[in-house]
Image (cartoon, rainbow, N blue to C red):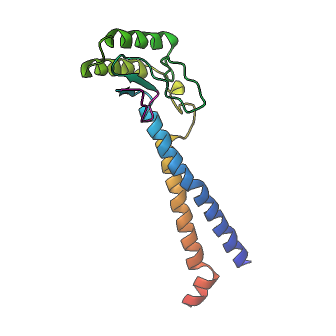
Amino acid sequence: MRFLLMFLVALACVALFAVGAPSVLVGIAEQGHADDAYVVGFVPDADCGDDHELYLRVMDATVLDCAPAGVSGSGQISLPGFTAAQEEELETLAANLGMDGLSAEEQQEIQRRVDEVAASVPQASRPYGDQAVWGAGRAWLGAGMVVAAVLGLIATFRFGPAGVSSSR
């Protein structure tokens, strides 16, 4: 009976580890994506490198379609939680500032305006805002699950039938 209990505890710890470890990785990835959601990527050509929602070409302020292969982009600004009017305002601002290319000051002005609008976006409209646990919270929860699983496995094998009988 004690062996069966040990087996069930060990199985539960392995399952806890199997859920916790990916949660850490997913949480870190979600947090990185959410942190970059309102950062404008200014690129010299049509190369989209990082994970931004919006890319503007420096030489003419055109919106770049940085979509995976097989997915068609819109060529318009589309930021999570922004209204159509706010997106249109940003397109107009970028077009007006980028007629002769975007200087560092003009890039900062566009980013500053995106930050101002993003500050007014309700939490539920932000990336992952509709989820109870996401990003850093998911990563910490996953880390706690991994620690609990490892400690549970150590305790199971340390104080299980073999560990107790050998220490007597």
116 relative to 142, above or below: above
Please identify the quadrant where the C terminus is shown. bottom right
Q: Is residue 93 left or right of residue 68?
A: left
Q: Quadrant of residue 18?
A: bottom right
Report the number of discs.
0
Q: In the image, which residues are magenta?
A: 45-53
Which of 80/68 is in front?
A: 68
Please state, as top left, top right, bottom left or bottom right, where the N terminus lies in the image.
bottom right
Residue at 58% in and 24% down: 72
Residue 96, x across and y down, in percent: 34, 8
Q: Nearer the viewer, residue 43 or 9?
A: 43
**Does residue 52 belong to the magenta stretch?**
yes
**Occupied quadrant, residue 133:** top right
Comparing 79 with 15, the one in front is 79
Let me know if residue 24 is in the magenta part. Answer: no
Residue at the image position 25 percent from the left and 19 percent from the top: 105
Give the percent coordinates (x, y) of residue 95.
38, 11
Left or right for 58, reference 17: left
The residue at the point 47 percent across, 18 percent down is 77
Q: Magenta residues: mostly which secondary structure?
A: loop
Residue 16 x, y percent position in the rendering: 61, 59
Q: Is residue 82 left or right of residue 104?
A: right
Q: Residue furthest right?
A: 1
State whether residue 162 is above or below residue 40.
below
- Where 150 sits versus 139, above or below? below
Which residue is drawn at the image coordinates 54% and 26% (left, top)? 124
Q: Quadrant of residue 157?
A: bottom right
Q: Position of residue 69 (x, y in %)?
A: 57, 33
